[in-house]
Image (cartoon, rainbow, N blue to C red):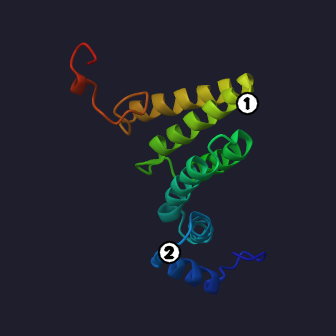
Amino acid sequence: MNQHGNVDRDAVLRAQVLLLGTGIGIHQEIAAYRILAEISPLTYLARLARALLTLGQEQFSGKHEAHLTVVLDAAGAVRRLAASEPHRDQLLIDALAEQQRLLEALGRSDDAAVARQELSEVGRLGFAAGRLVSPTGDPRPFGRRGAAGR
């Protein structure tokens, strides 16, 4: 959208064509998803979040500050999804777990505790609503590993 709230149809068309191509880079993919998420958030916000998490893992592993920035962006995209979106909880759990890990690595234990609290709440609510099988976000039913947890 432009500054007047109008959709730039050319930008949308370019983004769609770009995603149809082969061999595009992750940065181009993310740019396209950002544009398309403005007009179709239900379809593209989850894809944007996944691409951002992938970017963080692939290009910023070991660079905690830069990686954290990308993870925070991904979590923000997930939070914009409707609560009823089926993969929202798991995506948010993935982003928050990575956020917590990075904050701990950076020595920001208070911020990590806040992320851990939100992570716990998302898991609890998702489990209670039947959107997650386990409060930890593990999609496997509890009984698959046997009674002893093996």
- Residue 146 picture location, percent across and down: 21, 19
Residue 40 shown left or right of residue 148 in the figure? right
Which corner quadrant of the image does residue 143 belong to?
Answer: top left
Residue 110 is left or right of residue 148, and the answer is: right
- Against 107, residue 21 (above or below) is below
Local packing at callout 2 (Cα closer than 10 Å; few below 14, some 14-19, many 20+) is some
On the image, numbered disc 1 is attached to which residue? 106
Residue furthest front in the image: 62
Can you say whether 91 is above or below 109 in the image?
below
Task: Answer above or below: position of 104 versus 77.
Answer: above
Name the residue nearer the viewer: 106 or 96: 106
Q: Residue at x 74, y 27 (%)?
A: 108
Secondary structure of the residue carrying tag 1 is loop
Check disc 2 and give the amino acid type. Leu
Residue under label 2: 19
Q: Position of residue 91 (x, y in %)?
A: 49, 45
Looking at the picture, how far across and down is residue 65, in whole percent?
A: 74, 41
Residue 128 locus on image (x, y percent):
40, 30
Instruction: Identify residue type, mark 1.
Output: Leu
Residue that lies at the very extreme toward the bottom in this rendered image: 10
State the quadrant of the C terminus.
top left
Q: Is residue 81 something one can see in this rendering?
A: no
Residue at 74% of width from left, 25% of height from top?
107
Q: Residue at x 64, y 49 (%)?
A: 76
- Mark 1 or mark 2: which comes first in sequence? 2
Q: Count neighbours of disc 1 (C-alpha within 10 A) and say few if under 14, some if 14 to 19, many if 20 or more.
A: few
Q: Against 59, is 23 above or below?
A: below
Point 70% across, 39% down: residue: 64
Disc 1 vs disc 2: which is toward the camera? Answer: 1
Choose between 122 and 110: the one closer to the eye. Answer: 110
